[in-house]
Image (cartoon, coloured by chain):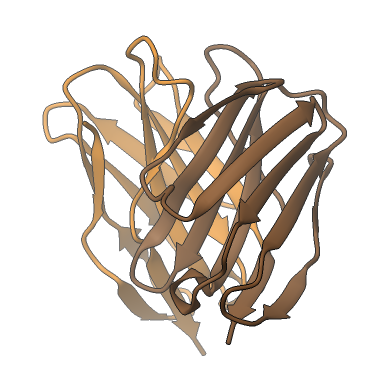
Amino acid sequence: DAGITQSPRHKVTETGTPVTLRCHQTENHRYMYWYRQDPGHGLRLIHYSYGVKDTDKGEVSDGYSVSRSKTEDFLLTLESATSSQTSVYFCAISERQGSYEQYFGPGTRLTVT
Amino acid sequence: AQSVTQLDSQVPVFEEAPVELRCNYSSSVSVYLFWYVQYPNQGLQLLLKYLSGSTLVESINGFEAEFNKSQTSFHLRKPSVHISDTAEYFCAVSDLSGGSNYKLTFGKGTLLTVNP
């Protein structure tokens, strides 16, 4: 299994509070991704990173920001959490040029009350 | 823009029966195709992939998928399923255009339920 951890694994927070989710990899992969998974929607890309300090938006980026100051860490921040951001969040990594395979972390279940 | 359609949201089958999970994609360029599996309360695991070469690809646990360029499909099949195959299956596509940054587009998933 690819060395990917996510923290926390579960979190309950209140509307309006800031939340930061962490993805940590030990594979030294260049690309990192944040997805959210919701019933009936599959996985949707929030943001991704193609190198340290290089990030870009995905299809559902509103309300989220990211940072990557080190190769191994990719942080996802909800500046002011809303109930619509209740979801399961997955981090993924990818490396080999021409491969396109992504390897996923175990996920973080976030509930915004 | 690429998109993926998984034609069935749920597929119930009996143990030892054959199964086909359907996936169609749309893209204006060449693509790589993937099937991922998600067991309950777990992350996604790569099941199999088509990058190039033979259009029939196989996984280690008996699944296979065939890339059909003319029909833009990548259906997943297994001749005889087990209870342990119960999971959600996701089809994904990545186009090979410059600037894609290795992004994947996922289908909405098919829940395969294998009953005794």
Q: Residue furthest left?
A: B70
**Residue at the image position 34 percent from the left and 71 percent from the top:** A40
Q: Look at 55% across and 19% down and name the residue there.
A: A99
- Give the quadrant of residue A89: bottom right
- Residue B28, x across and y down, in percent: 16, 22
| A73, above or below A45, in the image | above
Image coordinates of residue B83 in percent, x first then y, are 58, 78
Q: Chain letter for orange, please.
A: B
**Corner quadrant of residue A78:** bottom right
Pick the front one: B66 or A30: A30
Q: Nearer the viewer, residue A98 or A8?
A: A8
User: Residue sitting at 34 percent across and 60 percent down?
Assistant: B108
In the image, residue A89 above or below residue A2: below
Residue A3 in the image: state x and y as whole percent.
Answer: 84, 41
The hue used for chain A is brown
Q: Residue furthest right?
A: A26
B16 horizontally vs B43: left or right: left
Q: Residue at x 60, y 28 (%)?
A: A49
* The image quarter in which residue A20 lies: bottom right
Q: How many marks?
A: 0
Q: Position of residue B34 (x, y in %)?
A: 44, 38
Left or right of A28, for residue A93: left
